[in-house]
């Protein structure tokens, strides 16, 4: 599967009130591996960045004066993204800005071009409920080196997010054999038949059963006897 990790930097927080994209960074992965086929643009937003935004990304208005406008790169961007699954941290923000830029160019929305959009922030909140799930926090938690990130930058953040996403979803590969799926002469690699393999079933020993029961007792006490499993008789 071809996936694109995407990030943007903008002049402010609201596309609907006229803020624009100033930087787009895209990092390509195929079969969960970086390909090096990345895409990066600085853009002339035709307006100045808000002071607070400048403090975040550090990209000066003067630097962007001679950069291309979004309309000049839209075809290249859409061709690159076509059919891919996008991975974006806080996807509604970036997708909202991209949709507004596409609208200004008379183009349909982003989801008409790409295959799917994964919001890594939603995924992180499901994996680490109640914890901080900013990109920096996830880098620290998942041991991704972000020491070079003193300011936000779209390409750097996309590269970090790719590493974070791989670590965040590593469990997806836990029961999948690591097989080279490279194609030859346009033909997919043969499918492995695992039907002849039997998985061993390891039953809990007395010590583990006792520890489990003790945990259930503690949970029952903490909920003042309202645990669901105590309300049902064991099946015969």
Image: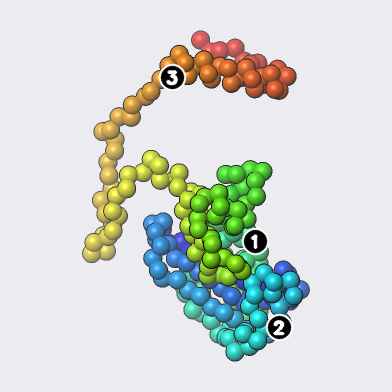
Residue 73's disc number: none
Left or right of residue 159: residue 136: right
Q: Residue at horizontal 60%, vertical 53%? A: 137
Residue 180: percent from the left, percent from the top?
28, 53
Residue 92's disc number: 1
Per the image, label 3 sits on a secondary structure element best described as loop
Answer whether residue 140 is visible to the viewer in this image.
Answer: yes
- Nearer the observer, disc 1 or disc 2? 2
Q: Which residue is mark 3?
A: 204
Earlier residue among tags 1 and 2: 2
Residue 118 or residue 54, whichever sits in front: 54
Per the image, label 2 sits on a secondary structure element best described as loop
Q: Quadrant of residue 37?
A: bottom left
Residue 115 or residue 72, whichever sits in front: 72
Give neighbour class at mark 3: few <14, some 14-19, many 20+ (Cα, 10 Å). few
Left or right of residue 183: residue 112: right
Residue 144 or residue 88, whichever sits in front: 144
Residue 227 or residue 166, whichever sits in front: 166
Residue 177: percent from the left, percent from the top?
32, 44
- Nearer the observer, disc 1 or disc 3? 3
Q: Is residue 192 above or below residue 109?
A: above
How far apart are the alpha carbons under marks 3 and 2? 65 Å
Residue 124: percent from the left, percent from the top?
58, 49
Residue 117: percent from the left, percent from the top?
55, 59
Q: Which residue is mark 2?
A: 47
């Amino acid at each position: 599967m071809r996936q694109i990790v995407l990030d943007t930097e903008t002049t402010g927080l609201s596309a609907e009130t006229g803020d624009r994209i100033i930087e787009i960074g895209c990092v390509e992965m195929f079969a969960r591996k970086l390909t090096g086929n990345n895409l990066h643009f600085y853009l002339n937003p035709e307006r100045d960045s808000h002071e607070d935004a400048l403090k975040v990304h550090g990209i000066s208005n003067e630097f962007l004066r001679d950069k291309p406008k979004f309309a000049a790169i839209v075809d290249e961007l859409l061709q690159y993204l076509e059919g891919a699954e996008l991975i974006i941290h806080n996807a509604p923000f970036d997708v909202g800005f991209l949709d507004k830029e596409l609208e200004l160019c008379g183009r349909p929305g982003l989801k008409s071009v790409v295959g799917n959009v994964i919001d890594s922030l939603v995924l992180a909140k499901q994996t680490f409920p109640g914890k901080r799930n900013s990109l920096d926090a996830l880098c620290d938690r998942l041991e991704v080196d972000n020491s070079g990130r003193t300011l936000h930058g779209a390409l750097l953040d996309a590269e970090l997010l790719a590493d974070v996403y791989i670590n965040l979803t590593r469990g997806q590969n836990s029961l999948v054999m690591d097989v080279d799926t490279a194609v030859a002469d346009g033909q997919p690699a043969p499918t492995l038949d695992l039907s002849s393999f039997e998985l061993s079933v390891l039953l809990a020993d007395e010590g583990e059963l006792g520890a489990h029961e003790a945990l259930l007792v503690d949970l029952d006490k903490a909920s003042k006897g309202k645990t669901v499993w105590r309300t049902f008789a064991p099946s015969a």
